Image (cartoon, helix red, strand yellow):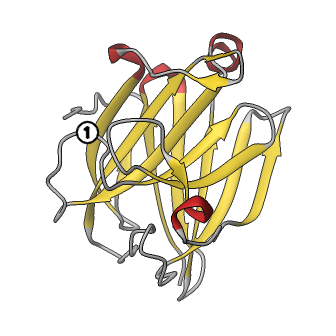
Amino acid sequence: MTYAATICLPKGWKFSWTFSSTDEISFTLKLAQETLDSYQWVGVGFRSTGNENSGMTGADIINILTGPEVLDSYATCNCQPTKDTELSGEDNLSNVSYDQELLEYRWTKPINSQDPNDMIYTQDSFAYLLWACGKIKDGVQLRHLVPDRGIVKVQLSENYTKDCEEIIELI
């Protein structure tokens, strides 16, 4: 059985996840052209509901430098996430792709990678979904502005779908 969910995020983004097997979860992030025209990086990630830190601290983040670079990262603070490999972890992403025509990024992660920088993705559990976007100046990823980020509580379930007409409540 395949499990899937979809949520429409601000800025015209559409994010979905699928429990593609008993040990993997696959993600798709479809961006709006306006995002790619206005920003040089985007990020999405999850933080467990047991982690009540504010912001992104402790979150398993996918940091995308717009174009083909998709980085498996972890937020040690409310700052630029650090690549898992720089924190003695592993790059656990597979099947990474970017479809320039569809403006769509795809990647797969293990449900439980055993990497301390990765969240355990448990079917039907609740988690905080984080999203953000920002600019890069002189090769440095700059902090996002307040309207360019958000957090929403989601359920990692096949029944979780927020269509694009529904307003999501950001935390």
User: Does residue 146 appear to the left or right of 107 in the view shown?
Assistant: left
Looking at the rendered image, the quarter that the C terminus falls into is top left
Residue sitting at 62 percent across and 28 percent down? 41
**x and y percentages locating residue 39 in the rendered image:** 62, 17
Q: Which residue is mark 1?
A: 55
Residue sitting at 17 percent across and 49 percent down? 53
Asked which quadrant contains residue 59, the reply is bottom left
> Residue extending furthest bottom?
22
Judge whether residue 17 can be spotted in this image: yes
Q: Nearer the viewer, residue 71 or 79?
A: 79
**x and y percentages locating residue 113 in the rendered image:** 52, 81
Q: Please count the marks in the image.
A: 1
User: Does residue 47 appear to the left or right of 106 in the view shown?
Assistant: left
Judge whether residue 163 can be spotted in this image: no
Residue sitting at 47 percent across and 84 percent down? 114
Q: Nearer the viewer, residue 20 or 52?
A: 52
User: Does residue 143 appear to the left or right of 92 in the view shown?
Assistant: left
Residue sitting at 59 percent across and 59 percent down? 86
Asked which quadrant contains residue 159, the reply is bottom left
Query: In the figure, 161 relative to 25: above or below?
Result: above
**x and y percentages locating residue 5 in the rendered image:** 45, 58
**Looking at the picture, which amino acid does disc 1 mark?**
Gly
User: Does residue 110 appear to the left or right of 123 in the view shown?
Assistant: right
- The residue carrying pointer 1 sits among few (fewer than 14), some (14 to 19) or many (20 or more) residues within 10 Å by Cα, namely some
Name the secondary structure under disc 1: loop
Q: Nearer the viewer, residue 148 or 159?
A: 148
